[in-house]
Image: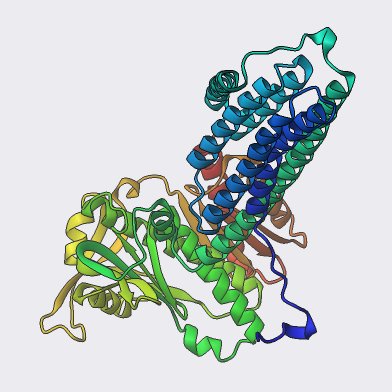
Amino acid sequence: MSPPAPNGHKKLNREDPQAKARRMSNYIRLLEFLVAITTLAVGIQNKIFPFDYILVIAILLAYPLIAQVITAVMERRSQLQQQTVSALIQIDAVFIGLTMATLHFTVVPCIALLIIVNANAVTGGGLFLWLMSFVWVVVGAFIGTMIVGFQMIPLEQTPSLLTLVSLLGLGVYVAAASLNTHQQTKIVLEAQENLRHQQKQAVELSRKLAKYLSPQIWGSLFSGRRDAKVETRRKKLTVFFSDIKGFSAMSEDLPLEKLTSMLNTYLSEMTRIAERHGGTVDKFIGDAVMVFFGDPSSKGSKEDATACVAMAIEMQKHMKLLRQRWTRDGIDQRLEIRIGINTGYVTVGNFGTDTRLDYTILGTDVNLASRLESAARPGHILVSQATHELVKDRILCRDVGEITAKGFNRPIPVHEVVDFRSKAGKYNDFISLEADGFGIHLNVDRVRNFDKKRILHTLAKSASELKKAEDVEINFEAEGFAIHLNSHKINPKDRSRILQVMGEAAMTVKERLIV
């Protein structure tokens, strides 16, 4: 004896809606035999047809029961196929043709049966099955004629009772078929609603899971280009490491809420820059960020290395904006990031078990990138000789000699990144100044055209009020631009320099951007 369901309720055996719909359709199909039997029985009862035709009634009763048993058994074994249903519908047509001959081709009853059998065929299999059923009706009628002989009752001689019974049977069939159609439509609508709900849940779950994976990995998994299984390969990648100098010591003095907000802002901004340059964000370790270029997609070692260094340059510039923002929030420490970049062959792929995977990279060249980051000066970028060889045509670097790295037996030649060669000696597209009561950050490459008027208006207003020695307090940020001005805190000796920098920023925005 099975245990009772929780809370004292009996277990409910919920039938599959689709199975229920199929069973209902089968009952509707068999309703045609009930109409045929009833019509023939009324004719025999009223001595319109010979009593010997009772044998036909017995056949018409036996066949549907046998067909129903076969259908039920096959459905229970999950072997019910469309071919079986189609075959039964065609056999039905043979018996209906036989019945029409037995009814002496009485016009109204035969038309009623033809309507029913054709409706079943169209519903059960479409145009082809309808044509085949029509053929089998003719075959059945021919067989019946061979058995009982050809007899036909003219329309004017058709008994009213026989007409009434056949039309009543047709009406019952139409009503039952309409009810079945309504039920099936309801099931379809419920299934569609179920599917929409499941899709919504899947999208929401996907959106949550996407936050734990880089966009490249997420995209390759969902497109089918990559499978979630333990596999690794050797590949030439450019590896990036960065951390905030002095962050650990500062974090001990900050309130938890402010520390959390600051770190999340920093990681969000760095991730946005990495994704814009095509980097795969491997992991965050506190304030440290690990990114690599070249997998799962690569533009070639040279382009991957250049994209990585370009990302590092933008991160260093963007750090000035973040530092300015943190200063306004009361964080006075001058936070700067150190960056190390190396290019070499590493092992990349899924590491772990069948139930828990970590997509990451391993190898000596990964360790070297980490050592370069530790050796870099705050606010600077160190690259290895291998990376320098790939980027030197487009990135200006200076040779800073060799460093001794833990885990490496020989000194490592390194280079410090200056900027893009294309920007060396040209009009400065990056302006940054920090002083007491003032901070400005401008990266023309990131400023959006539709922000140009607001930026120029803010600069003009700030400069005008500062020249008039009025009290000024302005905090304004846009993509690629930020300014903080508090005239009470400005040192008088910095005033002219501040006005000059604001003028340079205004001219840069005005000349370099198209409205």
Q: Position of residue 27 (x, y in %)?
A: 69, 44
- Front residue (pair 412, 37): 37
Examine the image and state in which quarter residue 150 appears: top right
Residue located 52% across and 62% down the image: 433
Q: Position of residue 148 (x, y in %)?
A: 62, 21
Quick check: 222 above or below 370? above
Examine the image and state in which quarter residue 180 appears: top right
Asked if residue 458 shows in the view, the reply is no
Q: Give the left or right position of residue 389, taking residue 397 as reference.
A: left
Q: How many marks?
A: 0
Quarter of the image for the C terminus: give it: top right
- Front residue (pair 163, 175): 163
Asked if residue 336 shows in the view, the reply is yes
Residue located 26% across and 68% down the image: 231
Q: Position of residue 363 (x, y in %)?
A: 21, 75
State the scheme by which the image is colored. Answer: rainbow
Quick check: 212 above or below 367? above
Q: Position of residue 492 (x, y in %)?
A: 64, 67
Examine the image and state in which quarter residue 126 appears: top right
Residue located 61% across and 62% down the image: 495
Q: Give the left or right position of residue 78, taking residue 405 as reference.
A: right
Quarter of the image for the N terminus: give it: bottom right
- Front residue (pair 220, 305): 220
Residue located 55% across and 43% down the image: 509
Q: Give the left or right position of residue 424, taking residue 97 as reference.
A: left
- Front residue (pair 296, 425): 296
Quick check: 306 above or below 237? above
